[in-house]
Amino acid sequence: MQKRMLGDLEVSALGYGAMGLSHAYGASLDEKESIYLLNKAYDEGYTFIDTAEVYGPYFNEELVGKAFSKIKDKVQIATKCGIRLAEHDRGLPLPDSSPAFIRKSLEGSLKRLNIECIDLYYLHRIDPKHEPEEVAELMASFIKEGKIAHWGISEANEDYLRRADKVCKVSAIQNRYSLMYRDYEKLFSVLEELNIGFVAFSPLANGFLSAAYQKGVKFDEKDDYRASMPQFKDESYAQNKDLLALITGLAQKYDATCAQISLAYLLGKRPYVVPIPGSRHEARIVENAAAVNINLSHDDVKAISSALDNMTISEVFGGTKK
Ligand SMILES: NC(=O)c1ccc[n+]([C@@H]2O[C@H](COP(=O)([O-])OP(=O)(O)OC[C@H]3O[C@@H](n4cnc5c(N)ncnc54)[C@H](OP(=O)(O)O)[C@@H]3O)[C@@H](O)[C@H]2O)c1
């Protein structure tokens, strides 16, 4: 697979989001199947693997550690810290950037991932009780100790990014970015100015943009977050009629699938955007990987952006901003 740069970290142009193997999309897959899928992703060229302490919790990092124990130097592993898991508050994470908490997380992640140095360590959520400079200093000390190689911020904003980057070079942000949620394009100019990459999470709007889920689709209310995501409600299908028609039309034009077009659009927006789609299905992991070979023309990328600016799009999980 082609490569892209996040600051000075080289990664595969698409990363594999491991979260869904054991978090948010129903009961966890078993270990054997998860490791098989992680290895399959690697075989398809995804060398950039995304996990987090809270996925599982903990279990997801262990899977990644086991899957890549023999090829540690061939993958770039990203994980995240800074969330206290309030176990009874499903989906309501509590940020905690206190140095003692983060240091304890780091030691745990290194152990579970079975590595000596994390390629990219993100602050998962900003904690307003701790200044960006304090967190950046902590990350600088981890880099000095050789425990992390690069750091990043998830759900970053411009002020935090600028202040943190002054203290310790930030390599990447990881924010929501898809055809249904483009609000963080407002960060493009600061990312370019500071040479920071943009890792796009939920790039398929949790699968909705693949057009594989029809109106009336049902998910397990107990442990599949999609059951309450607004984009999968019956009424959203009418609201997204134009969006689905746009993607389907492009899929025909490029002899591609809707998921591939959705990923190719993000890749075509900026050379430092790295989407990290997740899937529990081998065939979809292969399908998504092939999106890097679809080069949407510059005119098509512009036309899609302008069509999106002018169309009705339903609410999407995590925000409503186009
Ligand atoms: N930093 C953060 O706060 C944050 C938040 C959310 C996610 N993330 C990261 O971003 C990664 C991806 O995000 P995400 O899982 O939220 O959203 P996503 O990648 O947009 O969507 C994943 C969903 O789409 C489905 N899917 C994937 N490829 C498909 C295809 N070709 N055709 C049809 N359906 C397809 C998957 O279903 P199947 O599994 O059934 O194929 C899965 O349910 C996560 O794994 C995680 O690492 C980070």
Image (tube, rainbow, N blue to C red):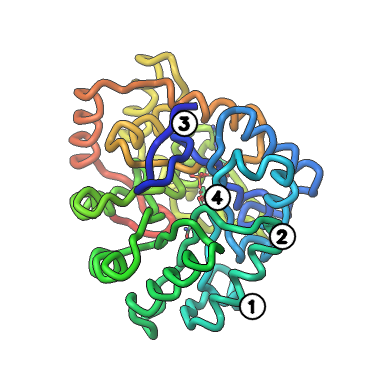
CA separation in Å, label 4 and label 2: 13 Å
x, y percent for residue 20: 62, 50
Foreground label between 1 and 2: 2
CA separation in Å, label 1 and label 2: 18 Å
Q: Amino acid at mark 4?
A: Asp
Residue matched to label 3? 259
Residue matched to label 1? 88
Q: Is residue 111 left or right of residue 200?
A: right
- Residues under numbered marks 1 and 4 in contact, where contact means CB atoms less than 8 Å apart: no
The reply to whether residue 60 is in sight is no
Foreground label between 3 and 4: 4
> Image quarter for residue 36?
top right
- Asked if the beta carbon under badge 4 is closer than 8 A to the nearest atom of ligand 1, the reply is yes
Residue matched to label 4? 50
Rendered residue at 67%/65% (across/down): 57
In the image, residue 97 above or below residue 221? below
CA separation in Å, label 3 and label 1: 34 Å
CA separation in Å, label 1 and label 4: 25 Å
Q: Earlier in the sequence, mark 3 or mark 1?
A: 1
x, y percent for residue 171: 37, 54
Please tell me how crowded label 2 is: few (under 14), some (14-19), or many (20+) other residues with Cα within 10 Å.
many
Q: Amino acid at mark 2?
A: Phe
Q: Earlier in the sequence, mark 3 or mark 2?
A: 2
